[in-house]
Image (tube, grey):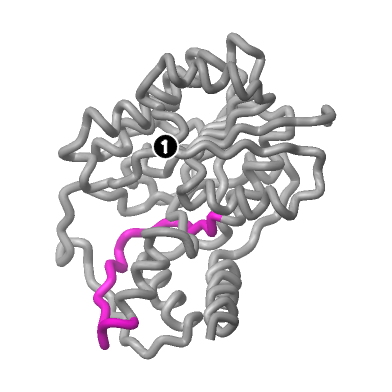
Amino acid sequence: MKENIKILVLGSNGQLGCELQFLSEVQEENVEFIFATRSDIDLTEIQALHSFVENVQPNIILNAAAYTAVDLAEKEQELANAINTLAPIEIAKICKEKGIKFVHISTDFVFDGLKSSPYLEQDPKNPLGVYGLSKSLGEDGIIQENPEALIIRTSWVFSGHGKNFFTTIVRLANEREELKIVDDQIGSPTWARDLAWFSFYAALSEASGLYHFTNEGVASWYDLAKAIVDAMGIECDVLPIPTKNYPTPAKRPSYSVLSKEKTRSSFGSSNNHWRDSVQALADELIMAEEDID
C-alpha cells in the first residue's frame, strides 16, 4: 500500500459515514480520512464538487452519500436523481481525470425481487421505484465514465445512528405493546460497521467493478425486528403481517438477497451473520446506556 493514503468520505453523517468515522479512529493502516458532510459540500453543485476535490487532493473517494428516502423519492424524483445519479457520475469523471480511486455504495433495490436465488452482480436490473432507478442509473453512468471504479452493492443497512430500521424498531417497541412487521419481503440485513470495514479494505485493494456485500444469512423484516427486540431486551410482541397489509408509496422487491460468492473469492473474507451483528450492536447500545446511567 502507498504511504500517506488519503480517503475522502462523502456523506459522512449517514449510517456508513458514522461507522467510517469510528473506523478511522481504530484502524491501524497509514490512512488519513477527510469527512465531508452536506454542509461542507453540496453534491448537486458540480463546480463546488470539483473545487473541493482539488483542495483535498485525495487518493480515494468513498461515496457514502445517497438519497435513501425510498417512499419520498416517488415525489422527489429530481432530487433523488441529482444525488443518486448525476452526482456519482460527476465524481466518477473527476476521479478518472485525476487518477483517484472511486468507491461507490449502491443497493439491492436495483433488482425487482422476482428471482428466487441470490442475485449475482451481472444479473439484469429492473428497479421497481424511483429510488432504485436513480441508484441503477448511477451505477450505469459510473461504469461508463470510469470502468476502474469500485461499486459495492449492499442491502438492509442498520446501525445505532440516525433514523433506520434498527433505531425505529427500538423506539416503537419501547412505546408500544405490539408491533406488526412485514414477513414476506426477504433480504440480508447489514450492520453499517461491517460494511464500513469491508468498504475500507476494498478501497485499499486493486479491485474494480461490481461487488456485493451484506451480512451472512437471510431474513424477513419481521425476523429482523424480532431479533432487534429480543437483543435489546424489550418486552414487546412482534407479529408478522403480509406486505398487502402495509401498503407504501414505493414498491419493494419481495426477494433481494445478494450473492457474495464473487466477493468471497476475490477478497477471501468471511463475514458476520446478521443475527450476530444485531446482537453486537444491541450489546454496545445497552452498555452505552448503562454508562450514562
Residue 115 in the figure: left or right of residue 182: right
Q: Amino acid at mark 1?
A: Arg
- Write down the region rendered in magenta: 174-192
Q: Is residue 147 visible?
A: no
> Viewer-proximal residue, 267 or 177?
177
Answer whether residue 251 is magenta in the image: no
Q: Secondary structure at mark 1?
A: loop
Q: Does 271 sit left or right of 255 as displayed?
A: right
Task: Work out which quarter of the rendered image holds the N terminus and state it.
Answer: top right
- Tell me if I can see residue 74 in this picture: yes
Q: Residue at x 37, y 31 (%)?
A: 84
The answer to which of 100 and 179 lies nearer the viewer is 100
Mark 1 residue crowding within 10 angstroms, few (<14) / some (14–19) / many (20+): few
Give the mark count. Answer: 1
Vertical side of 163 occupied by 31: above or below:
above
Residue 21 in percent (x, y) is at 61, 50
Q: Residue at horizontal 40%, vertical 17%?
A: 46
Q: Which residue is mark 1?
A: 38
Residue 132 picture location, percent across and down = 32, 37
Q: Which residue appears at 59% of the width and 80% of the height?
A: 287
Residue 148 in percent (x, y) is at: 62, 19
The answer to whether 52 is drawn above or below residue 205 in the figure is above
Residue 111 sits in quarter: top left
Q: Residue at x 31, y 53 (%)?
A: 254
Question: Of all residues shown, which one is farthest toward the bottom?
Answer: 235
Q: Is residue 180 on the magenta stretch?
A: yes
